[in-house]
Image (tube, rainbow, N blue to C red):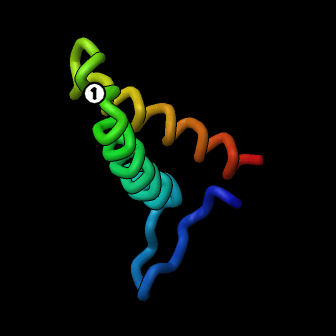
């Protein structure tokens, strides 16, 4: 993936914003899984845990996109 603007319905969008949105969807899925398993009851701060999941997903997707 090249890090140039992407044309989405006539609007140029930065590729970072698409990665941010995709990481958000992945984070929601991971948070739901963690909630069903009962992991959120064991963490100290659930919101901070969700933010950490988001950062991990975003970093992984960015590294994968950069090749």
Seen in the picture, residue 14 relative to 28 is either above or below; the reply is: below
18 or 25, nearer to the observer: 25
**Outermost top residue:** 44
54 or 13, nearer to the observer: 54
The residue lying at 46 percent from left, 60 percent from top is 18
Seen in the picture, residue 9 relative to 66 is either above or below; the reply is: below
22 or 26, nearer to the observer: 26
**Outermost right residue:** 67
Estimate how packed mark 1 is, as few (under 14), some (14 to 19) or many (20 or more) residues with alpha carbons within 10 Å. some
Quarter of the image for residue 25 reads: bottom left
Position of 29 with respect to 38 (left or right) is: right
Query: What is the x, y in percent for residue 39?
Result: 34, 27
The residue lying at 30 percent from left, 30 percent from top is 38
**Outermost bottom residue:** 9
Query: What is the x, y in percent for residue 45?
Result: 22, 17
**Outermost front residue:** 37
The residue lying at 60 percent from left, 39 percent from top is 60
Question: Helix, strand, or loop for circle 1?
Answer: helix
Number of numbered discs visible in the structure rendering: 1
Quadrant where the image shows the N terminus:
bottom right
The residue lying at 51 percent from left, 79 percent from top is 7
Q: Name the residue under label 1.
A: 40
Seen in the picture, residue 10 relative to 16 is either above or below; the reply is: below
Position of 61 with respect to 54 (left or right) is: right
């Amino acid at each position: 993936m090249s890090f140039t603007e992407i044309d989405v319905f006539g609007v140029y969008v930065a590729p970072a914003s698409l990665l941010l949105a995709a990481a958000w969807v992945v984070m929601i899925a991971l948070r739901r899984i963690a909630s069903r398993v009962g992991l959120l009851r064991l963490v100290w701060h659930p919101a901070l845990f969700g933010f950490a999941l988001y950062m991990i997903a975003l970093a992984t997707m960015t590294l994968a996109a950069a090749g």
